Amino acid sequence: MTVLFSWGEVDTTNVMTMLTLFGQTSNTRIAESSVNIAHSSVIPTLFNYTRKEGNTIVLSRTYELSSGDANDLRERETLHVIVTMEGSTVITTGLFDNSQATTAHALVELFTTFFFLIVWVVGVASFVGPVMTLVSTFEVFVIHYFLLSEANVYRLTPKGR
């Protein structure tokens, strides 16, 4: 049941688009339009894109979020994608609004917890009933057979002397 509640395909759209933008923004003539087109069509949750060469910022774009203000996002609701190439000083960074996925994940966790609690209560109730029947039957048997019969033996033994 955990698999049913939590399974989902991994969405690699943000990462793959950032990889593509890493190559496209190397050409300064089309860099800004590439980022703008990617934001408007493929990655609308992008709210900050930065391309650095060493310590120099070559391109920096900030977008408004449709869901509110980027400053209101918590750390876990922000997806950071950093793309670098080995042997290069170029670093591109994309910040994405990941609040919808975070909320969905929290709901899955909540429903999974409720499911486990329900299964546990039902499991305990269905196990305790038969076990208590056996225990109470065994207890009556023990009391009747051992205690009463041994009491009779002890009562009979002193009288028989």
Image (spheres, grey):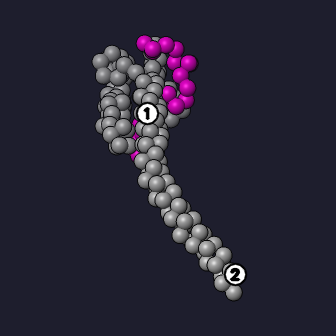
Q: Secondary structure at mark 2?
A: helix
Residue at (51, 57) in percent of width and height: 136
Res 26 quadrant in image: top left
Q: Secondary structure at mark 1?
A: helix
> Residue 79: within the magenta?
yes
Q: Residue furthest front?
A: 160
Give the position of the C terminus as an image quadrant.
Answer: bottom right
Q: Earlier in the sequence, mark 1 or mark 2?
A: 1
Residue at (53, 61) in percent of width and height: 140
Front residue (pair 76, 8): 8
Q: Position of residue 153 (x, y in %)?
A: 61, 78
Q: Residue furthest bottom?
A: 161
The span shown in magenta is 65-86
> Residue 68: within the magenta?
yes
Q: Residues within 10 Å of mark 2 (few under 14, many from 20)?
A: few
Q: Does residue 145 appear to the left or right of 21 in the view shown?
A: right
Q: Position of residue 20 (x, y in %)?
A: 31, 31
Q: Is residue 35 above or below residue 127?
A: above
Q: Is residue 64 above or below residue 15?
A: above
Say if residue 105 shows up in the picture.
no
Residue at (45, 14) in percent of width and height: 67
Amino acid at pointer 1: Phe
Question: Which of the numbered marks, if any, corresponds to residue 111?
Answer: 1
Residue at (43, 33) in percent of width and height: 111
Question: Which of the numbered marks, if any, corresponds to residue 158?
Answer: 2
Say if residue 17 shows up in the picture.
yes
Q: Position of residue 39 (x, y in %)?
A: 35, 19
Q: Position of residue 85 (x, y in %)?
A: 40, 42
Front residue (pair 121, 100): 121
Front residue (pair 7, 117): 117
Amino acid at pointer 2: Pro
